Image (cartoon, helix red, strand yellow):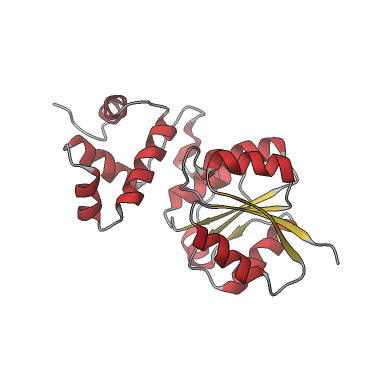
Amino acid sequence: MEQIKILIADDHEVIHNGIRDILRTSGRYKIIGHAYNGKEAIEKALQLQPDIVFMDISMPLINGIEATKEIKKKLTGTKVIALTQHEENEYVFQFLKAGGDGYLLKNSKKEHFADAIEAVLKNRRYISGELAEQLMNVSISNNPGNEGPEAVHLTRREIEIIRMIADEKSNQEIADQLNISLRTVETHRRNLMQKLKVKSVVSMLKYAAANKIIDLK
């Protein structure tokens, strides 16, 4: 029986252990490597050339969407499945446009992991059951993200966070108000900087003002 080589990319050790426990019941799947940030995910993928990469979207150094884009550019035979907590349509669209093959939520049932692997190996896209229904009538072609290569589209949560930053709220205040962890806020800020290709909060707010996300008057 041919084994399917799998690389896990996530910055939480508990996710690595969880996937290992889910897949260990089948002799068909072999975990050949682990990466804990987007940069390491790219390096390990190029080194190990796995059949499947389970990719978290929110990771340090390089986010999972950008890491997926780089991996798919260089390893066309490798399938990348997002394994994430992000349920927003915008993330699904961005990941699929980056070349991703499947989108799985971290709270998915155990059997869905094997379903996702087998689907993408047959060159079919797999969308987590929790998301499939809401995406049924939406396609990449009519997503507003197709306006052009320079267009940047932000999720509702990212817009919320930019507006709170503009109101001079600290990371902890944002976390408390949105009922999310401080680490999640920090990850959103890091992803925003990467997505907008800016190096400072001032540049981020200038972008937001120019695109009528905030009013700096």
Q: Residue at x 54, y 50 (%)?
A: 139
| Whether residue 98 is visible | no
Residue closer to the observer: 142 or 123: 123
In the rendered image, the quadrant that contains the N terminus is bottom right
Q: Along the horizontal axis of the image, is 52 left or right of 90?
A: right
Please tell me in which quadrant of the rendered image residue 72 appears. Answer: top right
Please tell me in which quadrant of the rendered image residue 192 appears. Answer: top left
* Residue 43 location (% of width, % of height): 64, 39
| Whether residue 204 is visible | yes
Q: Residue at x 53, y 52 (%)?
A: 10
Residue that lies at the very extreme toward the left in this rendered image: 217
* Residue 180 location (% of width, % of height): 29, 56
* Residue 125 location (% of width, % of height): 64, 56
Q: Along the horizontal axis of the image, is 21 left or right of 193?
A: right
Q: Residue at x 34, y 44 (%)?
A: 186
Q: Residue at x 53, y 67 (%)?
A: 129
Q: How many marks do you count on the picture?
A: 0
Residue closer to the observer: 4 or 77: 4
Residue closer to the observer: 20 or 108: 20
Q: Along the horizontal axis of the image, is 58 left or right of 208?
A: right
* Residue 90 location (% of width, % of height): 44, 47
Q: Is residue 74 above or below residue 79?
A: above
In the rendered image, the quadrant that contains the C terminus is top left
